[in-house]
Amino acid sequence: MPASPTGIAVDLRTRRRNETRLEVQRAALDLFERHGFEETTVDEIARTAGISPRTYFRYFATKEESILGDTHGFDEATHTCLTAACATEESLAAFSLADIEEAFRGTIIRFRRDQSEVAATVLRIRKLVCTNPALAKAAPGRYAENTRRWLALVNETCSATTRSRVRMILEVAQLTIHCAFDEWVNACASDLPDADLLTIYDSVCARVRDL
Amino acid sequence: MPASPTGIAVDLRTRRRNETRLEVQRAALDLFERHGFEETTVDEIARTAGISPRTYFRYFATKEESILGDTHGFDEATHTCLTAACATEESLAAFSLADIEEAFRGTIIRFRRDQSEVAATVLRIRKLVCTNPALAKAAPGRYAENTRRWLALVNETCSATTRSRVRMILEVAQLTIHCAFDEWVNACASDLPDADLLTIYDSVCARVRDL
DNA sequence: AACCCAAATGGCAGTGACTGCCAGTTTGAC
DNA sequence: GTCAAACTGGCAGTCACTGCCATTTGGGTT
């Protein structure tokens, strides 16, 4: 199996897989924007992406996942943040909301560097999610699943109290980001001058601290 | 239209409606416990409750709603709490997480007075929700819908900042209760001696404050 | 080169949630 | 008693999603 310069293994197979995955996501986003989420069938998405409906469900478990599957790097940020914290008992005890907030801030900043391309897609997705009721309803469930998975990383070694604390941190962090996303979408829709995700995120974080 | 002693209007029609609603909820809870959520079909629930499948969907929009529809009084608590806060601008500015937490505490205490009957049902429901993945995934979406509806009450009169603040308060309050529910279920399952919902809720609230 | 296994794909038939429509029945107001 | 509105059941249909099987394709082995 050949390796890319970054050391990540990439057969032809997995490269193709990633490509079609992206293709499907693009098709779904496009169709949802044009005709609405409920009006678009999985068959249409598959046809547009050039695959069979049966194959669609080998890439995404549900219709919603073609948009909600992409978490824009925040999942990865949480994951690395948490696994680092799980290293020792002390680091887990010291693990705090501020850690994840800092990691999220880093992810947001990375958006900017990738000039428009990524950030624009994120905005389109978030707009859909907070506009369409069906997606708005499906999204929290999807995120709760992730939280569950993460919590499993901590599960074994620590006390029930610590685990509960970690859960609260993860959930509040998620909550904060999603609120920021929503406000960002609204700000962009209203053409407000300070429609900057990082600025908004910081102010939402501050608001949480003042609760 | 006759009125009950409490002043609530109860025709025969609405009384019947409430009865069948309860009947369906009971049937669903029972079947889900015995055969599992995904293994139970809506047709079975309807048959057990003595109605047609078509009628089922006139009571509950989805299969999940037959359990998730009952929010054990916490929705009502939130609603009254929030409408009271919306009365004047000052009261809305003073509205805080502590207000809702106090209201929730009251709701929990009310469980106790209704000796076992209600509390037992709540426990059964919460156990199902935190055991079954499909329900665990559906639940957050359901609650997000409520938050949306509540936020609409505040929508018109106040600044974007205040609305954002109210949203955070509502969401964190929801989060706290659901964490408490989960810990309660786990404590009951392990037969822990201090498996008291109020005690657990208080400690979760404290944990949130320390974030 | 021929060969082979694992992974990927597509088609087909089936299940089950959910909806719109229509027709019959029940309830409450006058 | 009368009539409109609400409630109900049945039927046909759509669509998300799954299991199974046959076929193709990629990549390593001899």
Image (tube, coloured by chain):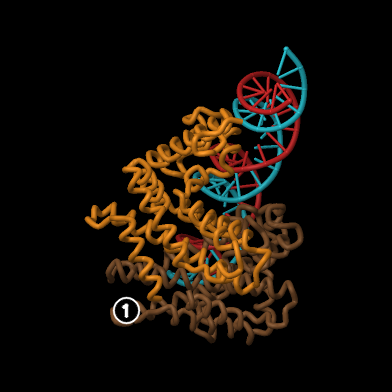
Chain colours: A brown, B orange, C red, D cyan
Residue B68 visible: yes
Q: Give the side of residue A89 with respect to residue A33, left or right.
A: left
Residue A56 visible: no
Which quadrant of the figure has residue A189? bottom right
> B51 and C14: which one is in front?
B51
> A150 and A62: which one is in front?
A150
Q: Position of residue A152 (x, y in %)?
A: 37, 66
Residue at 67 percent across and 67 percent down: it is: A127
Q: Position of residue A202 (x, y in %)?
A: 56, 82
Q: Position of residue A46 (x, y in %)?
A: 67, 57
Q: Give the side of residue A57 with respect to residue A149, left or right.
A: right
Q: Position of residue A31 (x, y in %)?
A: 73, 60
> B84 and D4: which one is in front?
B84
Chain identifier of the residue bearing label 1 in the image: A
Residue at 68 percent across and 62 percent down: it is: A131
> B71 and C5: which one is in front?
B71
The 10 Å Cα crowd at callout 1, few under 14, some 14 to 19, many 20 or more, is: some
- Judging by the rendered image, the residue that carries numbered circle 1 is A93
Residue at 34 percent across and 64 percent down: it is: B202
Q: How many marks?
A: 1
Label 1's element?
helix
Q: Give the vertical position of A56 relative to A150 (above or below).
A: above
Q: Give the vertical position of B9 relative to A34 (above or below).
A: above
The residue type indicated by label 1 comes to Ala
